[in-house]
Image (cartoon, rainbow, N blue to C red):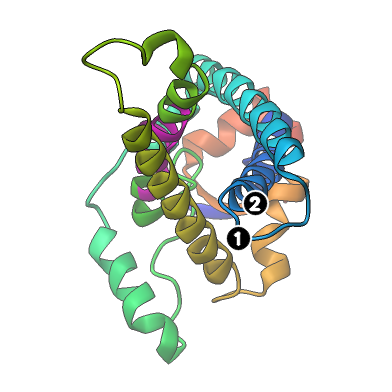
Amino acid sequence: MSLHKVKVFTRFERFWHWTQMALIFTLLFSGAGIHGFHHLLNFETLVWVHVISAIGLIILWTFAIFWHLTTGNWRHYMPTTDGLFKVARYYAWGIFRGEDHPYRKRFWHKHNPLQAMSYLFLKVALFPLLWLTGLAYLLYGYWGQGALTAGSLEWVAVIHTAAAFAMAVFIIIHIYLLTTGHSFREHVRPMITGYDEVDLTPAEEAYLEQDEPGRILE
């Protein structure tokens, strides 16, 4: 395998990432205001911003799911134990001793095992939990009037808020990790330009040079 600078993040992937980030920050901001953590906007405006941002995020997620399934990019998120413990040890210990990261990006595995596992959890557990509880809260008037569902709105709100706090914790950890190892700019640049250094097998290199030459810079 040889190291090359390759476009690993497509235009849609970068659009999805930054738009998702903006919408999630908007949701956290408006949700915090709804719960009374700040009073920068009035309550009605905060609710309106929260609902519109949530609908936008659900639409974005729907397109992202379709894109992942049709392009084969879902394979980047398949969990594996190959190298997992080395990466976990690096973040728990080696990173503070100046050790090199034990994982090198590959063409079809651009996320290290710990990243893949974390992102998979977000996509199949935390995001759907936020999505479903948010819709349940918004549509409570249609399902919350029966004898079995009366009073359940409080539980929906608690679960939705807990999932939002978990999302906030993930963001804090994510931003912190961007400041470790390489410079912050080097971590963020690939999600802006699309290009990053990855290991290519001879077959992958030959395929890209013949069928997608624009994806290899060097």
Q: Which residue: 66% across, 46% down?
A: 30
Q: Is residue 67 left or right of residue 133?
A: right
| Residue 123 colored in magenta in the image | yes
Q: Nearer the viewer, residue 16 or 188?
A: 16
SS for dot 1: loop
- Give percent across and percent down for residue 126: 39, 39
Dominant secondary-structure state across the stretch colored magenta: helix
Figure check: 102 above or below 157: below
Q: Which residue: 67% across, 35% down?
A: 47
Q: Is residue 165 left or right of residue 198?
A: left
Q: Which residues are magenta?
A: 118-131
Q: Residue furthest bottom?
A: 97
Q: Nearer the viewer, residue 180 or 125?
A: 125
Question: Is residue 158 among the parts visible in the rendering?
Answer: yes
Question: Is residue 217 among the parts visible in the rendering?
Answer: no
Q: Of the numbered discs in the image, which one, if any, rests on residue 37?
A: 1
Q: Characterize the local packing of mark 1: few (<14), some (14-19) or many (20 or more) Cα atoms within 10 angstroms.
A: few
Label 2 belongs to which residue?
Answer: 33
Q: Label 2 sits on what residue type?
A: Gly
Q: Is residue 41 left or right of residue 73?
A: right
Numbered circles on residues, count: 2
